[in-house]
Amino acid sequence: MKRNKPKYKQIIDAAVGVIAEHGYHQAQVSKIAKQAGVADGTIYLYFKNKEDILISLFQEKMGEFVERINDEINLKETASDKLSVLIQKHFDIMSEDPHLAVVTQLELRQSNSELRRQINDVLKGYLNLVDGILKEGIANGEFKQDLNDKLARQMIFGTLDEIVTNWVMNDHKYSLPHLSADVHNLFIAGLAHSAAE
């Protein structure tokens, strides 16, 4: 499988840097090859074209992202704690790799509808994590029984996404992970039963 070959990973990591620095449209395959330390032709042994590099990069990084979050979530007992971990890890992972944050928040927002469809497909793994937390919270009585979980999922993903985008647009001038507790409190205020219920 090509994904397990070291050069595949080298090219993916190089692509993150080149796309973050130059933007997707200016990121020529030759620049990615140079950054990866491989010949231009080598890229085409692993990827069909630049679009394929972008989608593969997102699949690879999102796969790692979901895996890391999932490993930590599984150590927690309550849905509230699991949601806290999801927020914290999301912000930690993005702040650890500002280039990846630029690519996911800015460069993946392409107008090409086929590209958008493929990106949405890759996001499903992450959205399933959020769904699992919400369903667990409803089932065990932590969250409101009449919670609109689809709307709550959009709210959670949309909020985290917008916070990271804002951080990227502000040149990482503040600590993203320090916002985790406040964001978690705001979510729980909307999801959990109030004392009056």
Image (cartoon, helix red, strand yellow):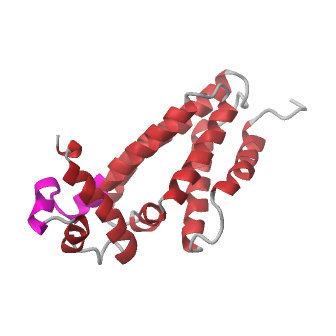
In the image, residue 56 above or below residue 126 = below
Extreme residue in the top direction: 140
* Residue at the image point whose x is 45% and y is 45% from the top: 65
- Residue 46 magenta-highlighted: yes
* Residue at the image point whose x is 62% and y is 49% from the top: 155
Q: How many marks?
A: 0
* Residue at the image point whose x is 32% and y is 52% from the top: 118
State the extent of the magenta-drawn residues as a range: 39-56
Q: Quadrant of the C terminus?
A: top right
Residue 157 visible? The answer is: yes
Measured as percent of width and height from the top left, residue 193 is found at 80, 32
Q: Main secondary structure of the magenta part?
A: helix
Q: Name the one closer to the observer, 181 or 152.
A: 181
In the image, residue 76 above or below residue 5 = above
- Residue 33 magenta-highlighted: no
Q: Name the one closer to the observer, 172 or 10.
A: 10
Task: Residue 133: name its quadrant.
Answer: top right
Compared across the picture, whether 125 is left or right of 37 comes to right
Measured as percent of width and height from the top left, residue 61 is found at 38, 50
Measured as percent of width and height from the top left, residue 41 is found at 9, 65
Residue 114 visible? The answer is: no
* Residue at the image point whose x is 72% and y is 38% from the top: 191
